[in-house]
């Protein structure tokens, strides 16, 4: 009669043999790909709990070893094989190969483990196949020129309100230990206005009286951290830990708020849709348009949870990445005063004595290039996952040590290493340097570089909020750089490279971001006086 330990031993042996077979099959099907043996999948929570090292590199390996991880193996793809736990995956850092994968959303689909952004409800980002097509059809038209004009006007207004606040209104020089507090507030208030028609002043806190439906200030503050909830299992929030309890309360309250807002908007739109299908200007926000478009689709429209899921993704999950890239842009310009002066002179040549207008957006391309370059060096979406739905081939220069072509078997998991791709020396000359001019399209090399830009993804699943973010960024950066010269404070003997490594060392979670970024701003007029 078998004992319980014999049964356990039998199950263990079977598990080991199954895993050994999977490893053998993966190596055989992807011959020629350099193999990296590890203990656990770096994209699993378990990897974060174990000490990092050679056998458990974790997600930070993508940043810490970006200069050598692939080049030392003379490759652009590495087969990561977890010996104990997790999925076998092909990590890729070739921009050309990444574009191939991202340009076919049906041949390379998102794996389940990276679709966790549906905790607020099904949405465009966390869907695949026909469901994704339906979400895209309904949500894409909400991002149009009228929305972008509104983004510019709101951003400009908030900038001037910021200058009137207590921290800014006195003196010609200001040192801010955490300038990202300003960019975070800006991005949140722009989304509140352009997304929900909540026009809060810079120094105004969200209160029950200032919004159409009751909402607690904590919800707005904590909502930025709700994105992290996707990496935590539900049972974690039942632990007797105060921070987790508050996050769960904020999450539940915020979800109820959105549910109430959507229900109220549906009733409002029943009386607002005109004979030609148009709606009033007060409802021409992203929020109003998503609800209206869903209603016009009838039974094919988005249901309540799907509307809530998309609103959260568009309006809240995205604002933190914009805020982060804005502060990194200013920091990099402070570290590169020649580039800052060049962009300032261009702004002056475009604006003269006039205020920046939305019509100037196209002429202010060098400002956009500064934002692009910061996003290249510090990509918010630093890792992306895909799964091949059929046997296929991908080709790219230097893909493998002995070949530029790789056969990808069906069900192969691919991790798109955006850090490695964005610092790819064959694509970006002097890849670790901050060179905004690389995005100018006056040469074949620059055109190739901008074609390979992956900061907002590419292909059919390119970020819908791309222009929303870039209009906001160009408007804010133009105002700041027109009026202020940006500096950093070095420690004794510190170089620009040392400051960058110390202050812009990223935090890798649901997205890539930095901690507090200190900046010193001096009025341009003080230099010209």
Image: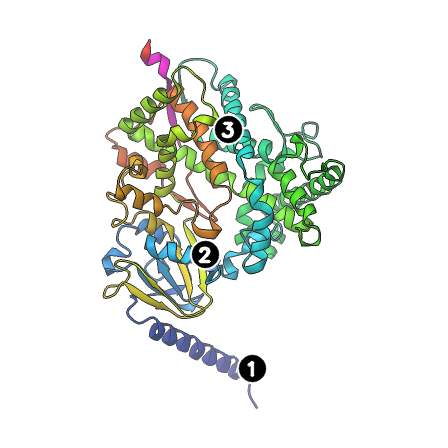
The residue at 25%/59% (across/down) is 398
Report which residue position mark 1 lands on. 4
Label 3 near label 2: C-beta < 8 Å? no
Q: Earlier in the sequence, mark 2 or mark 3?
A: 2
Asked whether the beta carbons under mark 1 and mark 3 sit within 8 Å of each other, the answer is no
Circle 3 residue: 152
Gap in Å between the C-alphas at discs 2 and 3? 43 Å
Q: Does 42 appear above or below 276?
A: below
What's the CA distance linking mark 2 and mark 1?
30 Å
| Residue 272 placement, left or right of 232 | right
Question: Residue 196 in the image: x percent, y percent?
Answer: 63, 35
Labels 2 and 1: the sequence-earlier one = 1
Where are the magenta residues, as a range? 516-527
Q: Let me know if residue 360 is in the magenta part.
A: no
Instruction: Give the position of the N terminus as an image quadrant.
Output: bottom right
Residue hosting label 2 = 49
């Amino acid at each position: 009669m078998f004992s319980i330990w014999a049964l356990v031993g039998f199950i263990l042996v079977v598990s080991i043999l199954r895993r050994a077979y999977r490893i053998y099959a993966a190596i055989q099907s992807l011959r020629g790909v350099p193999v990296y043996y590890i203990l656990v999948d770096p994209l699993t929570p378990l990897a974060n709990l174990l000490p990092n090292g050679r056998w458990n590199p974790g997600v930070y390996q993508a940043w810490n070893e970006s200069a050598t991880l692939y080049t030392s193996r003379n490759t652009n793809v590495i087969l990561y094989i977890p010996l104990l736990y997790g999925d076998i995956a092909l990590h890729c850092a070739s921009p050309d190969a990444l574009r191939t994968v991202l340009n076919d959303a049906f041949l390379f689909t998102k794996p389940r483990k990276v679709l966790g952004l549906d905790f607020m409800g099904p949405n465009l980002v966390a869907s695949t196949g026909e469901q994704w097509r339906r979400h895209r059809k309904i949500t894409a038209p909400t991002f149009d020129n009228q929305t972008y004009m509104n983004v510019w006007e709101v951003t400009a207004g908030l900038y001037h309100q910021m200058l009137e606040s207590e921290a800014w209104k006195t003196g010609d020089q200001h040192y801010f230990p955490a300038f990202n507090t300003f960019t975070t507030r800006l991005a949140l208030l722009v989304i509140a206005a352009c997304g929900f028609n909540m026009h809060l002043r810079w120094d105004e806190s969200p209160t029950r009286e200032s919004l159409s439906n009751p909402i607690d200030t904590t919800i707005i503050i904590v909502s930025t951290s709700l994105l992290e909830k996707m990496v935590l299992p539900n049972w974690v929030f039942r632990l007797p830990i105060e921070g987790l309890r508050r996050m769960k309360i904020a999450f539940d309250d915020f979800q109820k708020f959105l549910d109430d807002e959507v229900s109220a908007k549906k009733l409002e739109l029943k009386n607002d849709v005109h004979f030609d299908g148009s709606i009033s200007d007060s409802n021409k926000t992203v929020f109003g348009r998503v609800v209206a478009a869903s209603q016009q689709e009838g039974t094919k429209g988005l249901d309540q949870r799907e509307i809530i899921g998309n609103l959260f993704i568009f309006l809240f999950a995205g604002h933190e990445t914009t805020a982060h890239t804005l502060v990194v842009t200013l920091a990099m310009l402070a570290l590169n005063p020649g580039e800052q002066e060049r962009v300032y002179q261009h702004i002056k040549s475009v604006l003269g004595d006039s205020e920046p207008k939305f019509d100037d957006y196209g002429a202010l391309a060098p400002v956009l290039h500064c934002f692009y370059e910061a996003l290249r060096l510090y990509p918010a979406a630093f890792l992306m996952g895909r799964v091949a739905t059929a046997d296929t081939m991908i080709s790219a220069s230097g893909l493998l040590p002995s070949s530029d072509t790789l056969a990808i078997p069906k069900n192969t998991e691919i991790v798109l290493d955006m850090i490695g791709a964005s610092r790819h020396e064959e694509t970006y000359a002097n890849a670790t340097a901050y060179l905004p001019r690389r995005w100018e399209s006056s040469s074949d090399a620059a055109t190739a570089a901008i074609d390979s830009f992956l900061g907002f993804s590419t292909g059919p699943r390119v970020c819908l909020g791309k222009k929303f973010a870039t209009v906001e960024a160009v408007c804010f950066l133009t105002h700041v750089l027109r009026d202020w010269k940006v500096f950093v404070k070095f420690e004794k003997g510190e170089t620009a490279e040392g400051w960058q490594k110390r202050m812009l060392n990223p935090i890798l979670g649901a997205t890539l971001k930095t901690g507090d970024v200190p900046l010193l701003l001096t009025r341009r007029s003080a230099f010209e006086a």
